[in-house]
Image (cartoon, rainbow, N blue to C red):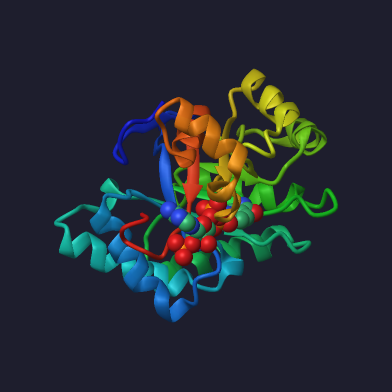
Amino acid sequence: MITSLNDRIKLNNGTAIPGLGLGVFQIPNEETADIVANGIKQGYRLIDTAQVYDNEKGTGEGISRGLKENDLQREDLFVTSKIWNNHLTYDETIAAANDSLQKLGLDYLDLYLIHWPGNDSFKDSYLALEQLYKEGKIKAIGVSNFQVHHLEELAKFATVTPVLNQVESHPKLIQAEVRDYAAKHDIKIQAWSPLMQGKILKDATLETIAKKHGKSVAQGDIQRDVLLVVKSVHPARM
Ligand SMILES: NC(=O)c1ccc[n+]([C@@H]2O[C@H](COP(=O)([O-])OP(=O)(O)OC[C@H]3O[C@@H](n4cnc5c(N)ncnc54)[C@H](OP(=O)(O)O)[C@@H]3O)[C@@H](O)[C@H]2O)c1
């Protein structure tokens, strides 16, 4: 279990990732810089964005401010982005990754994920990510929303095992099958929407269980999952 926003967990390539990160899904680009800078001030060290969120630029500005205002170094932060896998070729993937880096204003990404598997058309994209990983532009590569059959398909050609698979997971969606496969293959699971977009916080059954154990509903997520990305735009909730 992680006990602070600074706790890091080792991934299969030796990279250490903060257990709990701040996601910026559904935040308009022009609001993102303030929210990311605030998140860093509140102690978050992992920032999770994606090309499709259309706020990599704001995220980059927030990171730059957060580093300056809190006297941090780039390596104190862990930045994840994701490529929208829209039947991209190898070259298009390289170009898309460079575009992410440019918008974020970073020399390297800590983690780059294939956002969705698509119709099993992720081979060229994944091979391009392997190349960027070997060049050091991405410190770790992974996938998102992959089910077991996608991971099995990937294992047939990948020379670099994904460090993690980011999937929707909360008390109402435990993802047992993919968790089991991942554990056997040294791939971490990172939960997205761990609060079920805020809905689990109002669930009467979970509230009763949490009360019985002297915890908040959100704490249950932290005890169950090692890696999570959560979102709030409010400093107090962060
Ligand atoms: N890989 C993928 O396909 C994928 C898909 C979805 C999300 N993600 C990542 O996962 C991150 C988190 O997921 P998410 O944003 O969908 O959902 P989430 O973290 O489960 O929930 C976020 C929602 O909960 C609300 N909330 C947070 N703290 C609260 C509190 N203390 N009391 C009441 N409401 C609270 C937030 O509202 P306020 O902001 O108003 O506080 C927001 O509406 C995303 O930001 C993104 O980075 C990845």
Q: Residue at x 46, y 32 (%)?
A: 211
Q: Residue furthest bottom?
A: 30
Q: Nearer the viewer, residue 149 or 138?
A: 149
Is residue 114 shown to the viewer in this render? no
Q: Nearer the viewer, residue 139 or 72?
A: 72
Depicted 68 relative to depicted 117: above or below: below
Depicted 37 relative to depicted 217: above or below: below
Q: Nearer the viewer, residue 175 or 122?
A: 175
**Position of 20 compared to 161: left or right?**
left
**Position of 38 compared to 79: left or right?**
left
Q: Residue at x 64, y 43 (%)?
A: 167
Q: Nearer the viewer, residue 176 or 81?
A: 176
Q: Quadrant of the C terminus?
A: bottom left
Q: Residue at x 55, y 73 (%)?
A: 54
Measured as percent of width and height from the top left, residue 189 is found at: 58, 34
**Position of 47 compared to 129: left or right?**
left
Quarter of the image where one finds residue 143:
top right
Q: Residue furthest right?
A: 119
Measured as percent of width and height from the top left, residue 160 is found at: 60, 34
Measured as percent of width and height from the top left, residue 12 is found at: 51, 27
Q: Residue at x 80, y 36 (%)?
A: 153
Q: Residue furthest top?
A: 184
Marker count (numbered): 0
Is residue 192 shown to the viewer in this render? yes
**Position of 181 compared to 69: left or right?**
right
Depicted 102 relative to depicted 128: above or below: below
Q: Quadrant of the N terminus?
A: top left
Measured as percent of width and height from the top left, residue 174 is found at: 67, 33
